[in-house]
Image (tube, rainbow, N blue to C red):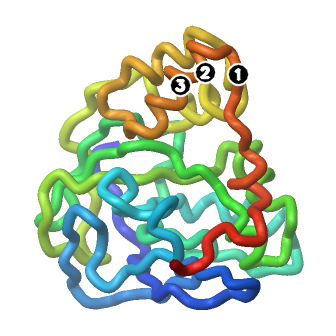
Amino acid sequence: MSRVDVQGVFIGKAEDIGGGLSSAIDKRRVERRMWLWEQGLGGDEHGDPRFHGGPERALHHYPAEHYRYWRKHYRQWAWKAPAFGENISTYGLTEDQVCIGDIFRWGQAFLQVSQPRSPCYRLNRRWGIPELSQYVQDSGRCGWFYRVLRPGYVSADDPLELIQRSYPALSVAQTIQHFFHFPLERPGLQALKDCEALSARWRDAAAQRLASNQVEDWSKRLLGLPLEGMRA
């Protein structure tokens, strides 16, 4: 894998989804060339900047091939991009083929894989499936985020080209295994803590688990709270 075509680019506006919650998960396809900066694509918004977006999660990539899996398990929906709120959709690039720290050229921009996505309850609310975020996490079909190393103009016509791989032993799939599926296995946690390309939030969580031998509470993220995500 060195060059992968982009099937779609998507941005969204933060909208009220009820109960005082705001979300930009309903994204729309963009055909024009766009400016990608350190915070993400121009015009793309986030419902709650405390937990979404920012330099470590500037761009969300979700493999289009996963939608075949979701169509099989939830037949009432015609799953397709950008159902999971992704910014980039591709075929031929999945969690087991991408490593933390991988650097890609996309148009004029340089991107670096920073962490897997942590599925949250907004997926449940968007699709009316209470267990969806948990199922995404358990399945390992989470997608991943990029940080932007060099801003520039990008478009769906520009392929993703892998130009550097620094952590070949730490794929996104392996990172998900270490963090979600075996969350107190010390060798895996140590590998996450030691990976300088992994986002600070995930490295800090790994360090905290190593120190406490306890896993942080995931229920707020996976299930939500009445006040979670309200606009300030």
Residue behind mark 2: 209
Q: Is residue 161 visible?
A: no
Q: Is residue 151 visible?
A: yes
Q: Nearer the viewer, residue 60 or 7?
A: 60
Instruction: Give the total number of marks visible in the rendering.
Output: 3
Q: Is residue 70 above or below residue 149?
A: below
Drawn side of residue 118 relative to residue 226, left or right: left
Which class describes the residues within 10 Å of circle 2: few (<14), some (14-19), or many (20+)? some
Q: Amino acid at mark 3?
A: Ala
Which class describes the residues within 10 Å of circle 3: few (<14), some (14-19), or many (20+)? many
Quadrant in which the N terminus is drawn: top left
Sequence-wise, the earlier of marks 3 and 1 is 3
Element at badge 3? helix
Circles 3 and 2 in contact, beta carbons < 8 Å: yes
Residue behind mark 1: 214
Residue behind mark 3: 206
**Residue 97 drawn at (x, y percent):** 46, 39
Circles 1 and 2 in contact, beta carbons < 8 Å: yes
